[in-house]
Image: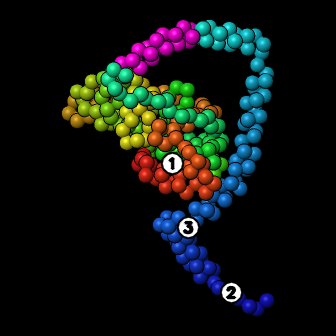
Amino acid sequence: MFTRGPSLGMRLFLLAVCSILLMYLDHQRGHLQTVRQALSVAAYPIRVIVDLPSRAFLWAGDALSTRRSLQEDNTQLRGEQLEARVRLQRLETLQAENDRLRALLESRPRLPDRILVAEILSVDLDPFRHRLVIDKGIADGLYVGQAMLDAAGVVGQVTRVEQLSAEAIMISDPGHATPVEINRNGLRTIALGTGDSGRLLLPFLPNNADVKAGDLLVTSGLGDAFPYGYPVARVLTVDRRPGEPFAEIIANPSAALNREREVLLVWQQDRVPDETTLSDDGDETEDAAAAADPEP
C-alpha cells in the first residue's frame, strides 16, 4: 500500500508520446490498417442495432398505409409504366440509330456502368461535415473515390472503405468539389458544397458566362471522379455583380441528400471489380483506389 507508481504528469506524458507515435506510424506506413479493419467488422453489428429503431418505425409507417392510398399509388404507377414503355420504344429506335452511326464512324461504343444498391446506415449532417455510412465495403468491391448516386442525381463519393461498410462524403459537404458542366452549352466549372444540403455554389464563373436559372448541371467526367453525364444540380439564381470578377451562382442539388435511405454505387468501365478486387485482404483494392482518389 506504500508503493507508488509514476506521477500523473508522467503518465500523461507517456500516453501523449505513445499516441503521437501511433498516429505517425499509421499515417506514414499504415501499420494499423489491419487493426482498423478488424474493429470495423466488430462495430458493424452495433451500427445495425442502433439503426433498428428507425427501421422499425419506417416499417410500421409503411404497414399502416391505407388500402385507398395503395390503390392510388398503384394506378399512378401503372400510368407511369405505360408512358415509360411508350418512351422506351422511341429510345430503342434512337439507340439502334446511334449504334449504326457509331459503326459508320468506327467509334467505340459506350458500355453502361455497373451499379450496386447500398443502404444508408447513418448520416452526419453537421454543417461542417456531411458524411454518411453505407452497408457495402471491400467485400463488395468498393473503392475510394467511387461515385454514389440516387434516383435523381449525384449524392457523393466514397472516402473510406472497410470490410463490411464504407464512409462517403456528400456533394454538399463544405470540403467537396464536383467537376460539372452546363448541359445546355457544355460550359465547365466546379460545384462546391456549402454545408447546406439544398445549396451548391459555383464560384468560378465570370459575370459574362452563359449561365441562367434553370440550367441543368451534369458531371463533366474530368478528374476521373464521376462518370460523365449524371445530373448534379439545377441553377437557382445568377447574381452578376458589377466590379466583381465572378458571378454569384447558387444551384440546388438534384439528389435528395437529406431524405434517401438507399443509394446507387457506380463503377466506371475501367474500375469494374474482378476477383483480385474482391479478395479478403482488400490491399490491392485500396492501392488501386488511392491512385484514382480525387482531392475533394
Location of mark 1 (residue): 144
Q: Position of residue 291 (x, y in %)?
A: 43, 52
The residue drawn where x is 67% and y is 59% is 39
Counting residues from the N terminus, which is met first, the one under dot 1 or under dot 2?
A: 2
Query: Image quarter for residue 41?
Result: bottom right
Tag 2: residue type? Gly
Location of mark 3 (residue): 31
Q: Which residues are magenta?
A: 83-101
Q: Taking 183 as reference, is 261 left or right?
A: right
Q: Secondary structure at mark 1?
A: loop
Work out whether 44 lies above or below 91. below
Query: Image quarter for residue 49?
Result: top right
Q: Taking 237 as reference, is 56 left or right?
A: right
Instruction: Give the camera-side residue of 189 and 207.
Output: 189
Q: Position of residue 11 (x, y in %)?
A: 62, 79
Q: What is the number of the mark on residue 5? A: 2
